Structure formats: C-alpha cells, structure tokens
Image (cartoon, rainbow, N blue to C red):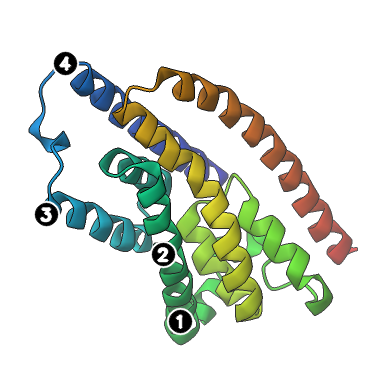
Amino acid sequence: MPNKFKFYRYFALLLICFILVIVILSKSGLIELNIFKHDLYKHLMVIASVFALPFLGFPFSALLVAIGIEFDYIIGLVIVVAVIPLHLAISFWIVNRFFRDKIKYSPLASRFRIFDISSEKHLEYTFIFMILPVVPYAVKNYLLPASGIPFRYYFIIGWIIQSALAAPFVILGEAASSLDYLVLFALLILFPTFYFVMRKLKERYYKLIAKKEN
C-alpha cells in the first residue's frame, strides 16, 4: 500500500508539472493551444470535473491547478470552497450507506488503525489525519467516515483543512496562467517547507496510534 501511495503522489506531481509546462509554453507564445481560450462551456467542464473526478480517485491537486488556470485565484478558491463540502457530505453518506463494512476489513483500515481511536481522541485524530501529506484526498474522504468519527468533526475540520491545503495549488495554476514567475518561485520554496511540516504531523499521527495500542 505505501508503494501505491508513492506512485499516486508521483503521478499527481508529474501531471501537475506537465500541465504547468504546457500552460507556460502556451501563454509565452511558444506553442498555440486553443484549449486555454476561456468560454462558458469550458468553465462548466472544469467545474464538473473538479466535482466528479475526485470521487473516482483522480488527483485533486491537479484539478486544483486546473481551476487556477481556468479562473483567477479568487473565483477559483470560491469554487473549491463550495465543492469540498459536497465531496465530504456525499462521501460520508456513500461510505456509511454502502461500504463501511468493506472498508473495515481493508488493508487501508488496518494500516491507519481507523477503528482503534477512542472517542476522546476523535477531534485530534480527525485533524491530524486530514492534514497527512501521504494520504490522497479521496482516501481521506472515504476512510474517515468508516472510522466512526462524528460527522460534525469530519465535515467542519475537513472543510477547513482541505480548503487551506487547496489554496496554494489554485494560486499555482493562476500564477502559471498569468506568467507570474515571482509567485511561481515563491511557491516552489513554499511547497517543500509545507511538506516538511506535514511530515512532522505524520510522525505525531503515528505516535497517537502507538499510544492507543499501548
């Protein structure tokens, strides 16, 4: 399973890099692509993709970059902040209606010990799990509802954290679209720093699990 997550991260990273390179080349006039001309139909297609594809496990980060490219970052963030609670609510309903028992006995449930968290740790667990850098967006949305975490924790914390995590990717897309190299450079510095902080939170997560097991 860790290898699958690593492959997923590399795939998402390569996809984002590919999108950014194509956009920068197009906006610089080195290549000509009509797909970057804005129109209502394409707006709706991008929004529909951002809503639907994460349910199928498509990398959410790449879709966030696409939102930033298609819209300016303010409108893009508004769209993302509106879509994320829909993902959370629908995922919670789907899991508890159809898949909770299947997830309970899955390798993912075993790896993350999602059924081993006491009720007094639900708030901390939800926060740390939502912010883990190694877990894909869709996996977070599907695993947590199966753990017995209260909906209010899952929904409110998920909405806040996922929206905050989404913002840099939307800004990255808008910066590439507008050829704002200063912002692109700043984000290239920000992302490794951000990832280092997330790794520390990952260590905190596993300590939380270890305390439960002891």
For the residues labelled 4 and 1, the Cα–Cα distance comes to 46 Å
Q: Which of marks 3 and 4 is nearer the N terminus?
A: 4
Identify the element where label 2 is drawn.
helix
Residue 169: horizontal and vertical position, in percent? 45, 40
Note whether 10 is above or below 115 in the view shown.
Answer: above
- Label 4, secondary structure: give it: loop
Label 3 with label 4: CB-CB less than 8 Å? no
User: To which residue does mark 2 refer?
Assistant: 82
Which residue in the structure is indicated by mark 4? Answer: 29
Identified at 47% across, 25% down, the residue is: 183
Amino acid found under the numbered disc labelled 3: Tyr
Instruction: Tell whether 1 sits left or right of 83.
Output: right
Question: Residue at position x 33%, y 22% from top?
Answer: 179
Rendering coords of residue 39 (x, y %): 12, 47
Mark 1 and mark 2 lie on one chain; the one further toward the N terminus is 2
Q: Quadrant of residue 65?
A: top left
Residue underneath mark 1:
93
Q: Mark 3 points at which residue?
A: 41
Q: Which sits earlier in the primary sequence, circle 4 or circle 1?
A: 4
Q: In this view, does 59 lie to the left or right of 28?
A: right
* Callout 3 secondary element: helix
Name the amino acid type tagged 1. Trp
